[in-house]
Image: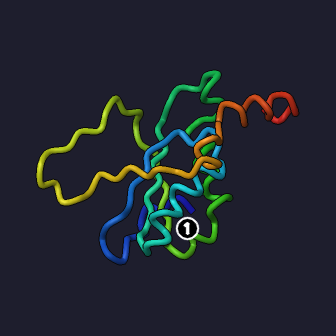
Amino acid sequence: MQNYLAKAQSKSGKYAMFIGRWQPWHDGHRWLIDQALDEGKQVLLCIREVPVDEKNPWTAHQIYQNLLLELKELVIEEKVRIITIPDIESINIGRGVGYDVIEHEPPTEVKEISATKIREQMKLEGKL
């Protein structure tokens, strides 16, 4: 599947890119990418390769596999592409770069979703 994803091309040649740790993937993340998908955009999910620690209990490869399961239909339909990237310090742009920088303001119920709380609950349930 990874080779397939590497070759998938956007029909428009462009993607709405989202960079994250996705530790774990949750409904807030889905809300976020749905903002682009609902506009007919294709989505590029970039998984930051961060060291495994308390806040990042899964490797980038494990997150990649999880996202493939969670978003299988969207990946098959070529609406979503998933890649891993090195960890980043900052995102820097120049003027006239040819793309927008967009911040999505989630509704309160989405804003309150916490991956930290999800990980804590997973620990209590023996799932982590």
Residue at (50%, 65%) from the top-left corner? 80
Alpha-carbon neighbours of circle 1 within 10 Å: few (<14), some, or many (≥20)? many
Above or below 94: residue 39:
below
Residue 45 location (% of width, % of height): 47, 53
Above or below 24: residue 90:
above
Residue at (59%, 56%) from the top-left corner? 30
Above or below 35: residue 26:
above
Which amino acid, mark 1? Val
Single out the residue that lies furthest toward the front. Answer: 108
Above or below 16: residue 127:
above
In the image, taking residue 15 as reference, residue 100 lies left or right, namely left
Residue 128 location (% of width, % of height): 78, 32
Instruction: Residue under label 1, please give it.
Output: 75
Residue at (38%, 60%) from the top-left corner? 16
Quarter of the figure that contains the N terminus: bottom right
Which residue occupies the foreground of this view, 104 or 14?
A: 104
Which residue occupies the foreground of this view, 77 or 34?
A: 34
Which residue occupies the foreground of this view, 121 or 51?
A: 121
In the image, taking residue 16 as reference, residue 106 lies left or right, namely right
Residue 4 location (% of width, % of height): 50, 66
Single out the residue that lies furthest toward the top. Answer: 54
Residue at (43%, 72%) from the top-left corner? 39
